[in-house]
Image (cartoon, grey):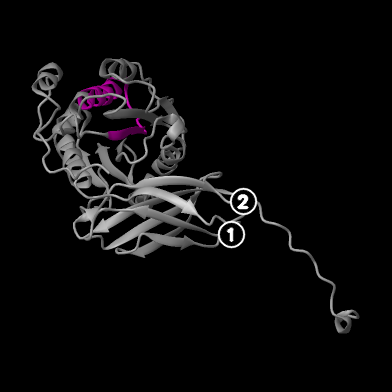
Amino acid sequence: MDPPVLLLLLLFSSETWAQNSGAHTECSLSEEELRADLMLLLDGFNHIGPDDFSRVRDFLKTLLPMVGPVGPDLVRVSLVKCGRDPEVEFYLNTFHDLSSMVDAVSRVSQSPPLPGGSSDHAVKFIWRNITQTDRGDRRKTPNILILVTDRSSSGINTDVLNSLRFVGVKVFVVRVKVTDELQVFKRDDNVAEVFTVEDYNSISNISEELTRSMCRWLKAILSRPQPESLRFTDVQPRRLRASWECNSRWVQRFVLSVYLVHPESHVQTILVLGHERSTEILHLLPNTSYRIIVFAKYSTGYSNTDTGVVTTPQGTVPTLLPLPRHFSSL
């Protein structure tokens, strides 16, 4: 188990990194502590002019050097854009250096001005297609989603964004030139935070504030002991037992989220008392794969998650016994 994070440095992993990046904010993580899977979602922006879209790209290029050193064991980044339909520009394991990512962002084209699409659909796409281990998502690594959008509130299902906290994804929403009200999320450890930018000329000005918020969240979540060694025993066609370890006496409760793997969908959420380290999961289907996520709830917020995948065995068809003689005429 990783030791609790007792001291986190400001902005970047070293003075050399800060000098090379040319970016400055108040918050950072040391290279030894820093790990995050960062998912960027460029949502909308298919009805604006090319100059404004270029400013959106410049915002991403400004943001990337500020989130910390990129690398296979440090920060991984993916980018998805969504006009009408989501399109993956690159996955979490596509690039492992900053310059390649910046070059890829520079080549991102604007989605065609077609009707349709929604933030709700795009966020679900991120969960089902990006947070996968074969696409570079790392177990026990904090997930951050930055949703940059010019859609109105009617295109954002706040329940979908808020529900991501139950799978350990922290959401930051950057709304550009949107005047209608969006439900303000309570500032909590795993709940979305919303930033509003009045026009495209000033979008890059939000980079430092956004980076500070991300770093504060990472500092907090990495300081809390998380569940580890998630394992499954007594796996039956319709039930199993999940067990884990957690080196803390201060857990209020553990939260387990159970998902079908194919098709990806939520099945149930289970709450477990903080002194317990095991629970039975019931009402499962035979010969079915499940993704099970567990995290700890403290008085100060949530921990990072541990995740496992398990497949239930094929159930046997019960043998039909002959009916008693007095039922034979029914």
* Res 100 → quadrant: top left
Task: Answer above or below: position of 59 versus 310.
Answer: above
- The quadrant of the image that shows the N terminus is top left
Q: Can residue 46 be seen in the rendering of this structure? A: no
Q: Secondary structure at mark 2?
A: loop
| Tag 2: amino acid | Pro
Q: Can residue 240 be seen in the rendering of this structure? A: yes
Q: Residue at x 38, y 20 (%)?
A: 109
What residue sits right under mark 1 in the picture? 238
What residue sits right under mark 2 in the picture? 313
Could you classify mark 1 by the number of other residues whose Cα lies within 10 Å: few (under 14), some (14-19), or many (20 or more)? Answer: some
* Res 262 → quadrant: top right
- The quadrant of the image that shows the C terminus is bottom right
Q: Residue at x 35, y 33 (%)?
A: 41
Q: Name the one closer to the observer, 65 or 309.
A: 309
Total numbered labels placed on residues in the image: 2
Q: Residue at x 51, y 47 (%)?
A: 310
Asked whether disc 2 touches disc 1, contact meaning CB atoms under 8 Å apart, the reply is: no
Apparent side of residue 219 relative to residue 252 in the rendered image (left or right): left
Q: Which residues are magenta?
A: 36-64
* Residue 94 position within the rendered picture, expressed as x and y whole percent measured from the top left: 39, 22
Task: Answer above or below: position of 77 versus 254.
Answer: above
* Residue 36 position within the rendered picture, expressed as x and y whole percent measured from the top left: 28, 35
| 2 or 1: tag closer to the N-terminus | 1
Q: Secondary structure at mark 1?
A: loop
Task: Answer above or below: position of 230 versus 327.
Answer: above
Could you classify mark 2 by the number of other residues whose Cα lies within 10 Å: few (under 14), some (14-19), or many (20 or more)? Answer: some
* Residue 304 position within the rendered picture, expressed as x and y whole percent measured from the top left: 29, 47
| Tag 1: amino acid | Arg
In the displayed orientation, state which residue is furthest to the bottom.
326
In the displayed orientation, state which residue is furthest to the right.
329
Q: CA distance from mark 2 to mark 1?
A: 9 Å
